[in-house]
């Protein structure tokens, strides 16, 4: 998935990204996240233009992807040891595919 992260010139605590829909090539969505870096939990608010965002408890996948990109992918959190790093998850999945019939009993 390719998306461009944009910062707001008027409000330095707002970040947004544009996403193309996985289901319809003609639809684009904009996920916006508001941060407060003075808090332990820096995400203050979020909004997305997708239809799922209105019915989700929590946040939609677009906002989640933006937060992951800003946190894990931009190395705010080291990807070497972060539990949600893609390389770590791939290793776990790969390890889970190597078992024998003896392991089942």
Image (cartoon, rainbow, N blue to C red):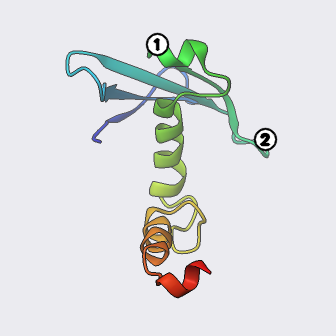
Q: Locate residue 12, reporting x and y percent.
A: 55, 29
The residue that label 1 is drawn on is: 51
Q: Are marks 2 and 1 in contact (CB under 8 Å)?
A: no
Q: Is residue 22 left or right of residue 12?
A: left
Q: Residue furthest left?
A: 25
Q: Which badge, 2 or 1, is on the more N-terminal residue?
A: 2
Image quadrant where one finds the C terminus: bottom right
At horizontal 47% and vertical 40% (from top left) the residue drawn is 65
Circle number at residue 15: none
Q: Is residue 35 above or below residue 28?
A: below
Q: Residue at x 33, y 28 (%)?
A: 19
Residue pictured at 69% horizontal, 42% vertical: 37
Camera-side residue of 49 and 95:
95
Residue in the image at 67% along x and 23% along y? 57
Q: Which of the image's four quarters has the N terminus?
A: top left
Dot 1 falls on a residue whose secondary structure is helix
Q: CA distance from mark 2 to mark 1?
A: 30 Å
Q: Is residue 77 left or right of residue 96?
A: right
Residue 49 appears in which quarter of the rendering? top left
Query: What x and y, as percent, mark residue 77?
Result: 58, 62
Residue 55, image x, y percentages: 59, 14
């Amino acid at each position: 998935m390719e998306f461009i992260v944009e910062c707001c010139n008027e409000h330095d605590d707002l970040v947004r990204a544009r996403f193309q829909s996985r289901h319809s090539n003609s639809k684009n969505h904009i996920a916006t996240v508001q941060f407060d870096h003075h808090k332990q939990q820096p995400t203050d608010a979020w909004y997305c233009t997708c239809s799922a965002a209105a019915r989700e408890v929590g946040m939609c996948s677009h906002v989640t992807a933006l937060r992951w990109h800003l946190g894990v992918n931009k190395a705010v959190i080291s990807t070497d040891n972060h539990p949600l790093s893609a390389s770590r998850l791939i290793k776990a999945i790969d390890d889970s595919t190597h078992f024998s019939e003896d392991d089942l009993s």
